[in-house]
Image: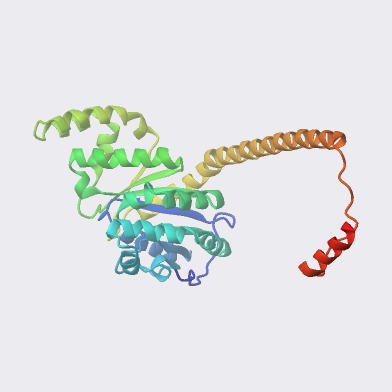
Amino acid sequence: MEKIKTSASSSSGAFGGSTAAVIVLGMAGSGKSAFVQRVAARLRQQNIAPYLVNLDPAVTTIPYAANIDIRDTVKYKQVMKEYHLGPNGAIMTCLNLICTKFNQVVDFIKSRSEQCPYCLLDTPGQIEAFTWSASGSIITDLLASSFPTLITFIVDSVRAANPTTFMSNMLYACSILYRTKLPFIVVFNKADIIKPTFAMKWMNDFESFQEALDKNSISYMNDLTRSLSLVLDQFYQNLATVSVSSLTGEGIDDFLKLTQDCVKQYFEVYRPIYDQLLKEKADSLAKETTENLDKLCTVGKKVVDLASVLEIAPEIEKMHIGGVDQENSEDAMLSR
């Protein structure tokens, strides 16, 4: 694996010198890379330099100039060949390899915090390779422990027009939210093709979703989807959503406003929980260290008491350092 490479950028800070890390997730084909490109372009229009990180090792081209690109460090096809892996296995292995050096990525982002208030991280199209892997969790935790971090979940509005597909996306969003416990934004992309007003309506009105579901062919999937919609009703109430078009730029300003709200939420909700967990871990470690020292002192006292009642071995008056022959001759003289 090659050393991580980075390219510089400059602008002015916005979050008091603290970069907001935006992890962009979504199903394959939902438009994650195009979304990152559009958000970056909008920020540059406002004279704000974004810090862009590509974490997809299998992508051929990306529509933006990345400050850090995993493809510069880990070669996807070489990993497939060397480790005899398939496409998804190679992606996970590449993430595992970059994960071992991700502290360098964090340092690079920190070095540009004053100039780059936003760091956008584009993740692999195979969403499970990041969200359900150990490397994805480590990367997310490293970012969340260093920067105000939020999750952006991209939904393909065209595909989500089907109630069953919509429910699948929402269920996935719910699982990611409860796994990361980070501020969360659902972005309905491709608004230039179809306005995702139907999605907003389904989330706010249970009956309208049921009506749309009933229009589909009757099957056990409808019953399952109907049950899931009841379960997720509470989930929708506190979920931040926005409609955007990565092609035209529609809704990008609304998204940036939501990111500012998420940064506040990070400091008010997530960070205190994280600090409390750190404190509990430190207290637990200190308690364990004290207990181990007490055990060691007890064992040491017993050893000292035992040594005091044992016969003391005679002192060695002479050490033989002249070799075997000299040692044997000296022993013979002593025996006489």
Classify 331 as above or below 291. Answer: below
The front one of 204 and 226 is: 226
Q: Is residue 208 in sight in this rendering?
A: no
11 and 70: which is toward the camera = 70
Identify the residue at the far front of this view: 336
Residue depicted at 29% across the width and 33% down the height: 204
* Residue at the spot 78% in from the left edge and 69% down from the top edge: 325
Tell me where residue 55 sits by quadrant: bottom left
User: Residue at (89%, 51%) from the top-left corner?
Assistant: 315
Of 75 and 194, the residue lying toward us: 75
Q: Position of residue 13 (x, y in %)?
A: 55, 61
Q: Give coordinates of residue 77: x percent, y percent.
A: 31, 68
Residue 19, image x, y percentages: 53, 56
304 with respect to 187 (left or right): right
Question: Can the viewer see residue 71?
Answer: yes
Residue at point 46% right, 58% down? 99
Quarter of the image with the N terminus in it: bottom left
Image quarter of the C terminus: bottom right
The residue nearer to you, when weighing 125 against 187, is 125
Furthest residue toward left: 217
Left or right for 127, reference 335:
left
Q: In this view, does 220 lie above or below 2?
A: above
* Percent of width and height locating residue 141: 50, 48
